[in-house]
């Protein structure tokens, strides 16, 4: 609501704190309402982040992550009753230490600040102004401090998330969020200058170019810990009763308690203590239990919690802890050190899950419980990696990488029909572009990083989104950026037609034999896959150009052909019968050869033969769970998608380690237990096994292109635009495939059978069709 901003709306901050100084600050204003049927309407933003409360109850968190040139504000529009009320905000500024220490890399800010526009309205007329800094007051939160991630341990890996917290409850002002609180000693905030809207920016006085939040608030749901794993200094059965709410837990001696949420989650844990003045409590969060420093089965009872921790000092009264930012955990260890002869009463803990509100509108069923488990684990993985933007992983980084995000967005589109996070990601990558023309590989990100191939995935992301949602305006908006990216690659074309050595990070996949994920093994060799992916991005750009009426399509088609001709001339080894990772070498991989198929460097029967060779040839470097997505695209294209079911064994292989999410790499010692680039089976089950695909942009038409499986019958549901389609596939005598579908409303449907034959089903709401097969089950 831009109309809530007025000339009086100003940014403000605590007068005693310098910009960017790490801290927690309280803001509040109390007021009286005498009339009925009033509305509270506010626009709110802060630098770095805020939690907003109305009469002690949290009503929002923000601002949604972005960058200073697209700085979000949230709009609140609520009923409010007559009486005395208080609006309060808890605002933090994170630290800015060295990489991997105190830096929340996805948080992009310019300093410190708090801003509120709006007030109380009656019949659309403002009757009470609540804009900052007029009647607001502020105070330093002297109870809460940022706690470095490595405060008491060395996790020995890269981290990029917000810091943990250290709290001294003796310095916490009680009831500060409520109207009756006495704030007479609090200070008036310092005026930091007027607001600036991005839509009207001219000569701004402040560095925040404000835009309205584009996505909904995160979904928060109450949940409880499921079981007690172990206890020291207290009886385990007492801990079990405590978790079940049967009785509080009394702690008199040094104790350690490990509890299990049942599944990995992203949530705000809540712990409440009575008594124990000057006692300390350390709360440590872990994805899994470690056995002698290693991850084995995730829930081994002889394992220990190892990870980040919050540190609390109790004040002898009631001390209730909930962190400012969410935590990622399955297991939590609570270590209590009572002071002197103190007794501590611990009330049953709980947590509020925190995720983007993805609404699953799909299902997939084979009758195989193992496939069902893969579906459920993949869905949980996708959800935990979707918050204010997509995450690579919630525990270690919380960063939105393009290579990950393309897969995550397709999972969202195919299973929920929700394109909001995907659309936002496309725009954010567009905003990330360096002046030379290449996109950053992750964004929002306070630290610049370039993975060259990820800019090409971004081009493909635009087509993915357009096909699912038909949004030509978005394509038009980002098309100049597509052109800039492709021109950057074109400037690196060598005389022989290949894309030459590219500076920055040439990451392809995490393989032991590829230093830093780079197939070249050295920094100077041009990569075959770069030219293939560039060719495909050019072909994608040509398609998009034609869709929006841009005349550059012919140009991009020419660049595509030039690239493919060079690849076939210089990168195909006739003795090996394979495309090599670098021209002039004998390094071979599933990665390069799958992209030979995807980019149509090879077609027809040769492509099908290559698709099978990719799976069967043990000498090729093998794709991880992440890059298997592109193996599937190659096999889908050349008619050997039955290999998907064999590759799916890699997902089954990690189930024995009792993961509740899919990991970064398919080994028990993986760094991250939750990486949504590994959740691609959801997309495969819906879009390739059932075969539900857009037949035209925005699902105005539907294509059903099912693929055979080893199961006699598979069925499922998938969103198609604003509708859902139910599909069942049944093998009759292993020589005939029976396909049934039904919709709520009629749409044009085309069936593409596994042998490639097309059948027009017409504009219908339902149908049953049969096709004799030349080849039977897998």
Image (tube, helix red, strand yellow):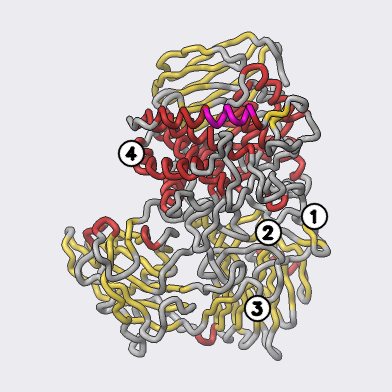
Q: Are marks 4 and 1 in contact (CB under 8 Å)?
A: no
Q: Which residue is mark 2?
A: 287
Q: Which residue is mark 3?
A: 281
Q: Which mark is residue 473?
A: 4
Could you say which quadrant of the image residue 185 lies in?
Answer: bottom left
Q: Give the CA distance from mark 4 to mark 2.
A: 41 Å
Q: Give the CA distance from mark 4 to mark 1.
A: 49 Å
Q: Are marks 3 and 1 in contact (CB under 8 Å)?
A: no
Residue 380 appearing in the image: no
Q: Give the CA distance from mark 3 to mark 1.
A: 28 Å
Measured as percent of width and height from the top left, residue 27 is found at 37, 77
Q: What's drawn in magenta, residue-wise?
A: 562-569
If the image is split into quadrants, where does the C terminus sit? top right
Measured as percent of width and height from the top left, residue 714 is found at 63, 25
Of tags 3 and 1, the one toward the viewer is 1
Q: Give the CA distance from mark 2 to mark 1.
A: 12 Å
Give the residue displayed 58% in from the left and 63% down from the top: 160
Q: Secondary structure at mark 1?
A: loop
Mark 2, other Cα within 10 Å: few <14 / some 14–19 / many ≥20: many
Q: Which mark is residue 296?
A: 1
Residue 564 colored in magenta in the image:
yes
């Amino acid at each position: 609501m831009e109309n809530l901003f007025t000339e009086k709306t100003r940014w403000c901050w605590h007068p005693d704190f310098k910009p960017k100084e790490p801290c927690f600050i309280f803001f509040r204003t109390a007021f009286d309402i005498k009339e009925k049927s009033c509305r509270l309407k506010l626009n709110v933003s802060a630098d770095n982040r805020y939690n907003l409360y109305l009469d002690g109850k949290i009503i929002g968190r923000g601002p949604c992550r972005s960058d200073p040139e697209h700085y979000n504000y949230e709009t609140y529009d609520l009923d409010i009753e007559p009486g005395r009320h208080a609006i309060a905000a808890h605002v933090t500024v994170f630290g800015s230490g060295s990489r991997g220490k105190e830096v929340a890399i996805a948080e992009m800010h310019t300093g410190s600040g708090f801003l509120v526009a709006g007030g109380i309205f009656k019949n659309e007329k403002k009757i009470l102004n609540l804009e900052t800094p007029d009647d607001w007051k502020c105070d330093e939160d002297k109870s809460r401090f940022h706690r470095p991630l490595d405060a008491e341990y060395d996790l020995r890996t890269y981290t990029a998330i917000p810091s943990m917290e250290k709290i001294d409850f003796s310095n916490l002002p009680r009831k500060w969020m409520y109207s009756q609180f006495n704030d007479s000693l609090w200070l008036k905030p310092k005026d930091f200058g007027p607001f600036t809207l991005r839509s009207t920016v001219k000569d701004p006085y402040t560095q925040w170019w404000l835009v309205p939040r584009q996505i909904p608030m995160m979904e928060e749901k109450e949940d409880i810990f499921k079981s007690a794993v172990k206890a020291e200094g207290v009886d385990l059965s007492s801990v079990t009763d405590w978790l079940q709410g049967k009785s509080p837990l009394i702690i008199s001696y040094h104790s350690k308690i490990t509890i299990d949420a049942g599944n990995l989650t992203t949530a705000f844990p809540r712990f409440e203590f009575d008594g124990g003045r000057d006692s300390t409590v350390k709360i440590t969060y872990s994805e899994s239990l470690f056995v002698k420093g290693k991850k084995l089965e995730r829930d081994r009872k002889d394992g220990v919690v190892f990870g980040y921790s919050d540190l609390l000092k109790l004040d002898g009264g009631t001390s209730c802890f909930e962190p400012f930012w969410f935590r990622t955990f399955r297991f939590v260890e609570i270590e209590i050190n009572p002071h002197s002869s103190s007794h501590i009463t611990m009330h049953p803990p709980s947590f509020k899950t925190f995720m983007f509100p993805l609404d699953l509108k799909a299902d997939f069923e084979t009758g195989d419980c193992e496939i069902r488990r893969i579906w459920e684990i993949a869905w949980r993985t996708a959800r935990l990696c979707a918050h204010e933007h997509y995450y690579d992983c919630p525990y270690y980084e919380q960063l939105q990488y393009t290579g990950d995000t393309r897969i995550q967005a397709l999972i969202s589109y195919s299973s929920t029909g929700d394109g909001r996070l995907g659309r936002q990601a496309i725009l954010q990558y567009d905003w990330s572009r360096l002046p030379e023309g290449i996109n950053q590989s992750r964004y929002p990100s306070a630290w610049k990083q370039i993975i060259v191939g990820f800019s090409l995935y971004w081009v493909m992301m635009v087509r993915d989104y357009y096909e699912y949602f038909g949004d030509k305006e978005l394509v038009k908006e980002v098309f100049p950026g597509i052109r800039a990216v492709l021109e950057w690659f074109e400037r690196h074309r060598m005389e022989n037609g290949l894309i030459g050595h590219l500076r920055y990070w040439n990451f392809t996949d995490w393989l032991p034999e590829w230093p830093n994920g780079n197939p070249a093994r050295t920094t100077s060799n041009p990569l075959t896959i770069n030219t293939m992916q560039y060719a495909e991005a050019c072909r994608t750009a040509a398609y998009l150009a034609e869709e929006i009426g841009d005349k550059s399509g012919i140009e991009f088609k020419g660049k595509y052909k030039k690239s493919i001709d060079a690849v076939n001339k210089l990168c195909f080894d006739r003795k090996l019968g394979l495309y090599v990772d670098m021209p002039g070498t004998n390094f071979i991989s599933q990665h390069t050869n799958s992209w030979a198929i995807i980019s149509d460097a090879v077609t027809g029967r040769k492509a099908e033969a290559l698709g099978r060779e990719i799976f069967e040839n043990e000498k090729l470097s093998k794709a991880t769970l992440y890059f298997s997505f592109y193996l599937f695209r190659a096999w889908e294209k050349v008619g050997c998608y039955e290999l998907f079911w064999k590759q799916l064994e890699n997902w089954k292989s990690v189930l024995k380690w009792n993961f509740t999410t899919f990991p970064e790499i398919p080994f028990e010692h993986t760094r991250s237990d939750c990486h949504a680039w590994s959740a691609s089976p959801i997309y495969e089950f819906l879009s390739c096994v059932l075969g539900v695909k857009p037949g035209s942009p925005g699902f105005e038409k539907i294509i059903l292109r099912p693929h055979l499986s080893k199961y006699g019958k598979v069925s499922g549901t998938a969103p198609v635009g604003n509708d859902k389609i139910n599909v069942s596939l049944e093998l009759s005598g292993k020589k005939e495939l029976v396909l049934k579908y039904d919709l709520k409303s009629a749409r044009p449907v085309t069936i593409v059978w596994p042998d490639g034959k097309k059948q027009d089903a017409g504009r219908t709401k339902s149908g049953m069709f049969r096709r004799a097969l030349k080849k039977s089950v897998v």
